Image (cartoon, rainbow, N blue to C red):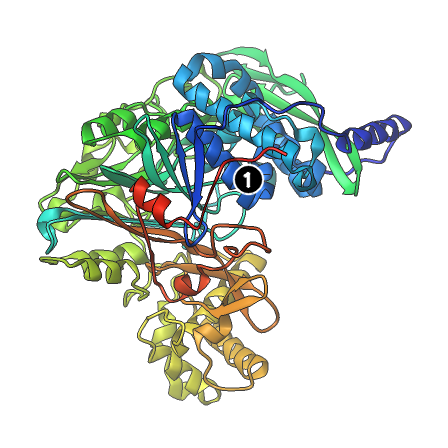
Amino acid sequence: MLRMHRLSAYSILLVLIGSLYSCGQLSYEYSGYDISNIQIARDFYGVPHIFGKSDADVVYGLAWSHAEDDFETIQQTLLAGKAMVGRVFGENGAAVDYFVHLLETREIAANKYETDFSPPFKALVKAYLAAMNDFALAYPERILLPAAFPVSETDIISAYILSLAQMSGADEAVKKIVNGTLEIPEVKDPSAGSNAIAIHPALTDSGEAFLAINSHQPLTGPVAWYEAHLCSEEGWNALGGLFPGGLTIFHGINEHLGWAHTVNYPDKLDVFQLKMHPSKKLHYEVDGEYLVLEEKRVWLKVRLWDFITVPIPKKVWKSIFGPTLVTDQGTFSIKTGSLEIITAPEQWYHMNKAKNFHEFSTAMNQMALPGFNTVYADKYDTIFYVSNALLPVRNPQHDYSKTILGDSKSKLWDSYYPFSALPQQINPTSGYLFNTNHSPFKATDPTSQLDPTNYEPQMGYLLTENNRSIRLAGLLLNQEAMSYETFKAIKFDKTLPDSLLYELNVNPLFKLDANKYPAIAKSIQALQAWDRSADANSVGAAYFAYIYYFLRDRTTELTLDPKRTLSEEEAILAIESAQTFFLTAFEQFPVTLGEYQKLVRGEQEMPLFGLPDVIAAMRSEPLNEKTRKGEQGESYIMMVRFGEGLPIVETINVYGASNQQDNPHYADQMGLFARQKLKPMILDKDVVLKSAQRIYKPKKQ
């Protein structure tokens, strides 16, 4: 997307100015926020439990404790909101900055913040920013870019808008427009999903409701989970996961209820190809008359060496249809609700504080979250599922499922389906609800499912399943008096179904005649004898993992159709490659998955379970010439029982509470995670304080 330009004398002058600006000192003072009512209690695993008199106190404490653990990653989020990523991370970061300018997330944030957010929520934002800026003053050695401070309301809201636009598909749309691949079907990473399961108390042996919160996120980076407990005297008592830069719990529990999110794929975004004038530059035709694209030059400051940044001029455009890209293949605009309704962070706040299903559904009715399946359970005998999304009410005379010609205002939309129109279920007779990023019309047993014909086709909801949904549906069907241990075993299941549902049909692997290929007969037999389990001690799983990634990479390199059926020739090629690799790299036969795939943190390595699209999913990437390391999949896990009193909770995060290598909690949850074990957590303030390993207040230097 970016091309380096030869430097003119003017550019060299800008380089020097930019270099000095980047190296500047912080020139503001501490916020003066009253921290006397804030307590941070670190438990045995270093997880912060933040207590405050007000909700704003809690948010200040959350920002401070999260910065202690991962200030560097939080800054990546804030830098994105400020369009300053390129100043720290070079050309790749400048691509993010361009995206910010293209979508105008900063302008949207500045224009809408005061009018769209409530005073109570703005108090939380103010507290978060006060803590961020105070922490930067207290620990200047940890600052990535002094010019990025102080951070403002525009910065943090811009970061939220950017993130939610990405989750709505804006980044993929831009990439496809730039690469000229708009109409090529997107191949979804089967590990980049999540699981959510709710069991009604009528189906459990203890009379409790069960909830599994099981997101499959990257194990590190700006969208890796951070665990925290937030508790104020204003009725906020929530525990769960959030991303760097988050002001609230994104999914988790409070004293009364809990919810889990998974990514969903209805039609949240439209791409319009503009009808450009044959000779007049930037003129496009709408309803028989020509309009002119808004054009703006932006400067992307790109780091080349330490303290040296190069300014690169780029242009961004906008039409009445939205942010616009001018390419050799044509001129395209994108339109998505996530750039128009920006109050998702406040909706999460209200979900955090809901005391019952009525209050929770009232929060959901705000319709600010642009997507996410939501699976819910509470202590009052209610389980619930909705495939939530900010879906436009489109003109039924036009087909929006592919790129649409932007030649008429009749194709624009300005309203969204209400919450009540979305696919949702409450307390089905089956007694359970679940989602694994598959069709919302297969959220429970076959007798209780929603009918897709009752929903507008233009909503674009999936009708398909995946390996996880097939496996989970089979495990949940006909369960009676389910124990909590059975529930945990289902959530931690690592077995693929008999017939696999990957984008590439790999089922021919298991139908080969080993007698036809004596040189690889043992490998074929090992693969076909595999019980489809992704245990770390599985030989078949190691073979399948190698073959899966071999075929994935080969498909990408050769630009083959990812939705094809594997040929016998390809199957043999993959197995030959696997056998050669294991005999060469390991000098032995057989090799287990845990020998080949590792959980890695610093100097620690552990055998790692999981494959793409098993319930306990894991995607790995090369660590060295011999082994792979887990990159995305099982990460933050929460298992909950709702009954009398406070919920009973167990959680695990993949590595630990801190991202600082010298912190004792940098990798202290790794062993539990690798063995699929959980640690107890609790919402009771008195118990937390009595057992805390450390209790302190934010300390300004």
Q: Relative to the observer, which residue lies in front, 511 or 209?
A: 209
Which image quarter: residue 29? top right
Residue at image location 43% in from the left, 69% down from the top: 567
Q: Where is residue 654 in the image (x, y as percent from the top left)?
A: 44, 56
User: How would you rate the neighbour count of disc 1 (Cα within 10 Å): few for under 14, some for 14-19, many for 20 or more?
Assistant: many
Vertical side of 481 occupied by 169: above or below: above
Above or below, 660 relative to 8: below
Q: Is residue 434 above or below residue 140?
A: below
Q: Depth check: 198 or 62 in front?
A: 62
**On the rendered structure, is 5 left or right of 682?**
right
Residue 378 at what x, y percent from top left? 19, 39
* Image quadrant in which you'd find residue 586: bottom right
Q: Quadrant of the C terminus?
A: top right
In the image, is 214 to the left or to the right of 79?
left
Q: Which of 438 and 653 is in front in this view?
A: 653
Q: Could you tell me which secondary element the residue under label 1 belongs to?
A: helix
- Answer yes or no: is residue 317 visible: yes
Residue type, label 1:
Ala
Q: Taking the image as drawn, is residue 273 in sight?
A: no
Q: Name the residue under label 1.
A: 67
> In this rendering, is residue 543 above or below 187?
below
Q: Where is residue 551 in the image (x, y as percent from the top left)?
A: 49, 65
